[in-house]
Amino acid sequence: MFAQLFTFLASLYRPATTRVRVFHNNDVPAAWSTGYRDEHTVTQVLTYDVAAPRTEQEVLALVEEAFRLCNDDPTLTADKRARAYRFRRNRSLSVGDVVGVGPRFYACARSGWRALPAAPCIEQRAGHGTTPLDEVSAPPVTRTLEELLRRSAAGLAGRLRRARGR
């Protein structure tokens, strides 16, 4: 009986806020044509908190809002998040970039968004149009050592292929 009560109470718990995080793909301009791939790494460029979404539709609306914020003209918007993002000289969000809402991650595709099965591999790197945040909020999921090794091997293999193609 106690276990059932605990399960019921746990199902009622919903955090009041959730974190939205925006990432630039480090493998640009290639990612602009191929889209996000598991071997790609990303740099966190924006983070902010919002009211926690209740449905998948609300999550996707927050992803779309993040896209709009990162593509707004800073001289025409009153949104402080968009202005701060552009003030830091960040480029527009593009194909291959990633938006996280709580524990869910979505890659920007040519049309719409593709849900990612796991958190992207974060490698804070400055580049033209990409200014990393000073503090990276911890990913909401814990990666296993096996996943980290798989992603590292895939990333290294991708870099070797690109180096040979040059």
Image (tube, helix red, strand yellow):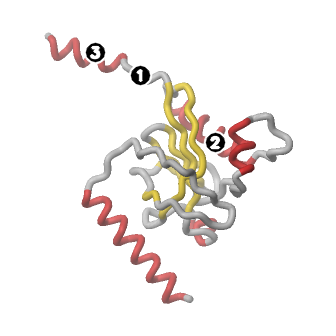
* Secondary structure at numbered mark 2: helix
Q: Quadrant of residue 9?
A: top left
Q: x, y percentage for residue 145?
A: 25, 58
Tag 1: residue type? Answer: Arg
Is 39 situated above or below 112? Answer: below
Q: Between 58 and 111, which is closer to the camera in this rendering?
A: 58
Q: Residue at x 66, y 57 (%)?
A: 94
* Secondary structure at numbered mark 1: loop
**First in sequence: mark 1 or mark 2?**
1
Side (left or right) of 116 relative to 143: right
Q: Residue at x 69, y 47 (%)?
A: 85
Real-space Cα separation, disc 2 to disc 3, in angstroms: 33 Å
**First in sequence: mark 2 or mark 3?**
3
The residue that disc 1 covers is: 14
Tag 3: residue type? Answer: Phe
Real-space Cα separation, disc 1 to disc 3, in angstroms: 12 Å
Q: x, y percentage for residue 52?
A: 51, 27
Tag 2: residue type? Answer: Ala
Is 116 situated above or below 126? Answer: above
The residue that disc 2 covers is: 66
The residue that disc 3 covers is: 8
**First in sequence: mark 1 or mark 3?**
3
Q: Residues within 10 Å of mark 1 (few under 14, many from 20)?
A: few
Q: Residues within 10 Å of mark 2 (few under 14, many from 20)?
A: many
Find out whether the residues at labels 1 and 2 contact each other: C-beta distance under 8 Å.
no
Q: x, y percentage for residue 74?
A: 80, 45
Q: Residue furthest left?
A: 1
